[in-house]
Image (cartoon, rainbow, N blue to C red):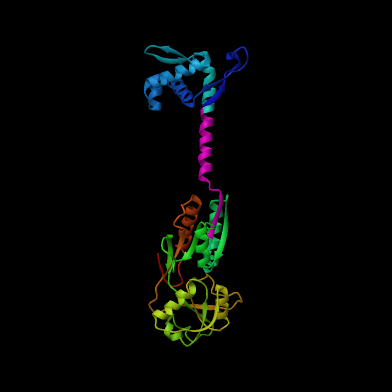
Amino acid sequence: MLLICLPDSEAEPTGAAELKVSLKQLSYFVAAAETGSIADAARLANVAQPSVSWAILKMEELLELELFVRQHAKGVSLTAGGHRLLPQARAILRMIEEFEASARSQAQELTGALHVGCYSTLGAAYLPAIIAEFARRHPRVHIEIHEHTQDEILERLANGTVEVALAFNVDLPDGLIKLRIRSGAPYALLPDGHRLLARESVSLKELKDEPLILLDSTPARQYFLSLFDAAGVKPRIEHTSPSFEVVRGLVSQGLGYSVLITRPLSDVSYDGLRVHPRQISDKVPVLETCTIRAPTSRTTRRSQAFQDICVQLMSNRMDPFRSER
């Protein structure tokens, strides 16, 4: 219901009285005034003619003011009081339209906080660009980053600390809600001066006697060792590190080779030395990257927006050698 006040000239002697008039009555009044016909107003509103007639009559009773002169078979025409109220009625209806449009706009604008989990090696390669794009599209949402091992991410998903996470689809428990983003093949990372640099691809058997720098985090360790198992090779592990960049740095220093899945756009390590990715000629499975959510979670508009941006940005970025999307 809407409260309107009569003009002073129509007010009761004791002052302007607040009278309850509905928006529907106002819209019928304006439609009848603009068309000059109750029947035409009813057609515009897609309601029966008696409904419009009754609504306008009740409005006149509330206002204690005749708004129309009814002329049989000639429609209706505004009274002097109706003419005075018509601009106000139009202004009120426009104000309501603007109010609804503003409300819809605010409903479409995302706000609040989004807690995002990310497996560590994926974080450095993809998360900054994803968050930057999210901030451009949804500036009123604050993203909290939780960069951990896969086990820690799963724990945070389970307890509700994290709403959505970016992870590799390796050893994930059943029941998680997964959205496949991209898939890519693992590659060998060789140092400057390596004997196989002239080759476009190398086999794990050719590397089996050389020192391996192993990325030692969950699920990376299990996945990379499974590649050697599938190739019938027992690697000679020289160094391990849970840090992706430490692994690349050790390779750049000539201390061994590594097998990785995420490839930065630059083939230069933190210490400024080059590293050289090469395809693995053995038949190795591609590894999927996906977003994951807890089975009990609901898809919020914030988490859906995050997943949409992940798909848009990550699926368009090529893997170093081949990609399946």
Is 182 a magenta residue?
no
Identity of the residue drawn at 42% across and 12% down = 70
Specify start and end residues of the magenta stretch as a single range: 93-116
Q: Nearer the viewer, residue 213 or 70?
A: 213
Relative to 126, residue 226 above or below: below
Q: Is any part of residue 137 visible from this angle?
A: yes
Horizontal side of residue 278 vs 271, given as left or right = left
Q: Position of residue 192 (x, y in %)?
A: 54, 82
Is 97 rendered above or below residue 150? above
Residue drawn at x 38%, y 19% as measured from the top left: 50
| Extreme-front residue of the structure | 159
Kindly report the secondary structure that dominates the magenta region of the rendered protein: helix
Residue 281 in view (yes/no): no
| Residue 161 x/y as whole percent | 54, 57
Where's the C terminus, which quadrant? Answer: bottom left
Out of 199 and 4, give the one closest to the viewer.
4
Q: Residue at x 39, y 73 (%)?
A: 285
